[in-house]
Image (tube, coloured by chain):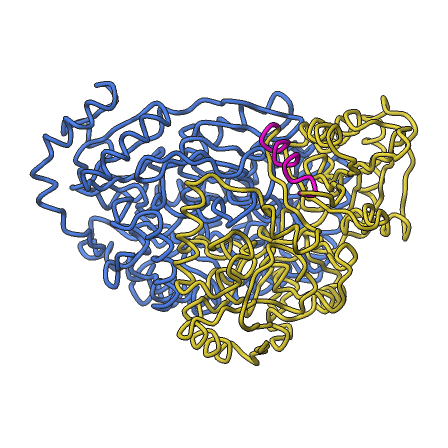
Chain colours: A yellow, B blue
Amino acid sequence: MTVHTPRDEQDASIIIREAADKGTLLNVSGNGTKAPMGRPNQTDASISSSGLTGITLYEPAELVISARSGTPVLEVMRVLAAKGQELPFEPMDYRYLLGTKGEPTIGAVAAMNISGPRRIMAGAARDSLIGVRFVNGRGEVVKSGGRVMKNVTGLDLVKLMAGSWGTLGFLTEVTFKVLPKPERMATLVIRGLDDRQAIEALSTALGSPFDVTGAAHLPDRDRRGGSTLIRLEGFRVSVDYRMNELKRQLKRFRFMDILEGVGAEALWQSVRDATILTDQGQRAIWRVSTAPTKGPDLAAHVAQALDAQWFYDWGGGLLWISTPLEGDAGAAILREATRTFGGHATLVRAPAEVRSAVDVFEPQPEALMRLTRGIKVSFDPAGILNPGRMYAGV
Amino acid sequence: MTIAFPKPDEAVLARRREIIEGLGRLVASEALIVSEDERRAFETDGLTAYRQMPLAVVLPSTTQEVSSILRFCHQQGVKVVPRGAGTSLCGGAIPQEDAIVLGVAKMNRVLDISFENRTARVQAGITNLAISQAVAHEGFFYAPDPSSQLACTIAGNIAMNSGGAHCLKYGVTTNNLMGVTMVLLDGTVVEIGGEHLDSPGYDLLGLICGSEGQLGVVTEAVVRILRAAEGARPALFGFEKAEDAGACVAAIIGAGIIPVALEYMDKPAIQICEAFAHAGYPLDVEAMLIVEVEGSDAEIDDMLRRIVAIAEPFKPKTMKVSQSEAESAAIWKGRKSAFGATGRVADYICMDGTIPTGQLPYVLRRIDEIVKSYGLGVANVFHAGDGNLHPLVMFNTNVPGEMEKAEKAGEDILKLCVEVGGCLTGEHGVGIEKRDLMTYQFNAVDLEQQMRVRGVFDPRWLLNPAKVFPLEGRFAA
């Protein structure tokens, strides 16, 4: 299979225009670290952003960074860290979960709207993404947004590109709003809570004026209760003060510790990357978003029917659930759960034959599917960019 | 008066009686406004220099009514101009003679509040401030705070992706919206997003935010509510040069501090506001910064101490850290009265470009030159943290030709914003006001891609069609 690695935007434009003319179906990718996600699709050739690298603009005082889409996330983080800044949304690294190798690209972070625990406070990747350049399915170079964070000029195609999985265009450059790296991070750990108590504690913390930047619950396997994690970040004075206040407000929950330093960082990384689930070998992994108070009901519903393991992030609103691979990998039960309790479920990890047989993304009502198909055609009339990666026919 | 409206469709005008009868079958008689006197209240919005009398005005009370009205207009080929409270500063809600106005202001109830999930479901005609008031008893608020928040509706906020003074920390509407109930032009009711975060599929919620009423009519919204900080206090700094103030902003952010507000005023703005509000502003400085931080008293003290230390090398002529509620209120009173106070000394048009913040001294110099070249005056207020600049170009309506000059000066200023890497509008929207300038920011391909997306929702250009896209070069999907 031909792999195109355009050296610049013009190059990408020529490749895609030609593919559109010939009806060549293109797999749109970065370095392929998330290739085993989404619906498996059949393509004739591949276009990769791996040749489009480098930071194109970085103004620390304006809190903005632009990079070509194939720039490794690691490189972006390194450049930001040198000036004491970071990507606010704490993008997850899928390599551990998927067992893939290579360097994840910043373009994929945008294209898949990849966020982490701090999403609860600082927004998702799409909230920090303020500008894009891309080549649409006609081979046209399009820009939307820009380098300023307050911009309401025209339709916000930036948002459409975020989370479109390469089905609308081939991103060539992305611009993110960034934030200062906090001086200090501390995590309050409450032990021994069941799921419902934990979500109650997390809701209390997130409803406090202390800008909680992480709120996770890791249920214990042997049912003695788990670890409930509440993270504060900021200036030293502030974190100290807020931690004391938070402990006071949560004192009805006993057994509290403060976790700091490398151990705490590693723990949040395992929440971010969902590696808490991966010691379970060959199982399917689902990512479910729902209202936080519905989280425990949803988990209980799934656990009643399936041998499931799970943990919560986003104050209970994000559940990572692992299920046995047999049959539909739990799809019918998960869909029933989201229908009952609200929200949506995405099958993140499963063998290709399972991802072909069941809906990977939450099925949408027909009216929304009609809009989805219309939008796809408006960007990619020949249907050559990552066809079928999200939904059949899109 | 340089902005054109499309020529009204004579065939639709001729069918006015029939169209009104049709609408009359869909809503109660008090929800349908047809008399000229009553329609006059809807002929303009915040951009009062422009007005157009609509065919009729309809004020539905339910999503179902909105659906039947839109389905009817779709079938009859009648244009629809959606309207919230009509506070748009860019003419986003100004009608057309051959269009009906569909106002959502009657749908103004809070439907559900969950403090545990930090969400509120509201009808879209509720005012921005009413959401905050509905959750204030638990110490919560709705973050985006446009200065019209007392009157403007969440429907309008969604249509314009409205901002406010606290965006640097809390973001704009799109960052605080979790779901909507929206009616499409053919009457179909869709639910997008909900009480959960980050819906799957294309980010339709993000697309709708800022779409200026061209994609559908939002009737309900789920918004994120936040617990308010324990307290907030500002400090005020006066500088001899715009460059010093700009460098001070960069140094504050460079030190890892994100103030909740970071406001800049130039000398004319300071003088106009001081004369009106007696806020204790320094009159002998070229530039002034208001820097506000949030937290407990101890946190605020610590943060303001840091900010003062950062500011000192830039030799501020004035440095005042608020010590009391009264002092804080005085500092803000001046800034918040900027538009009103300017209106007392002159007519003005308020521009709304965004610039990369590092370009501020250059842009202010150029704005001064531009405005002087038209023989006019200008006062500048600026959200210095996020780059959103509001030059108030002053003129006298009674002098023939001055308003046109002000419009031209405003146009040149917005082109300048684009030239330095910014954009035409940071929070007011395009509407009719900036419609014909879109080609300065976007090339034909960029605009065509936007129009193709628009066409998915409204292929016949019936929804708010006079807005956003230049009248030349439009095409049907």
Q: Is residue A336 magenta?
A: yes
Residue at left 85%, top 51%? A265
Q: Please identify the quarter of the rendering in which residue A33 is found.
A: bottom right
- Which segment is the magenta one? A328-340
Is the residue B446 above or below the residue A304 in the image? below
A252 left or right of B430?
right
Residue B300 in sight in this render: no
Is the residue A143 above or below the residue A245 in the image? below
Quadrant in the picture for the N terminus of chain A: bottom right
Q: How far across and how far down the image is residue A325, in percent?
A: 74, 45
* Most common SS among magenta residues: helix
Q: Residue furthest toward the front?
A: A327
Residue at left 86%, top 24%? A253
A140 left or right of B103?
right
Q: Please identify the quarter of the rendering in which residue B116 is found.
A: top right
Q: How far across and how far down the image is residue B66, in percent?
A: 32, 30
Q: How far across and how far down the image is residue A24, in percent?
A: 47, 72
Q: Nearer the viewer, residue B467 or B1?
A: B467
Q: Nearer the viewer, residue A126 or A340?
A: A340
Residue at left 21%, top 53%? B1
Q: How far across and how far down the image is residue A42, in percent?
A: 55, 64
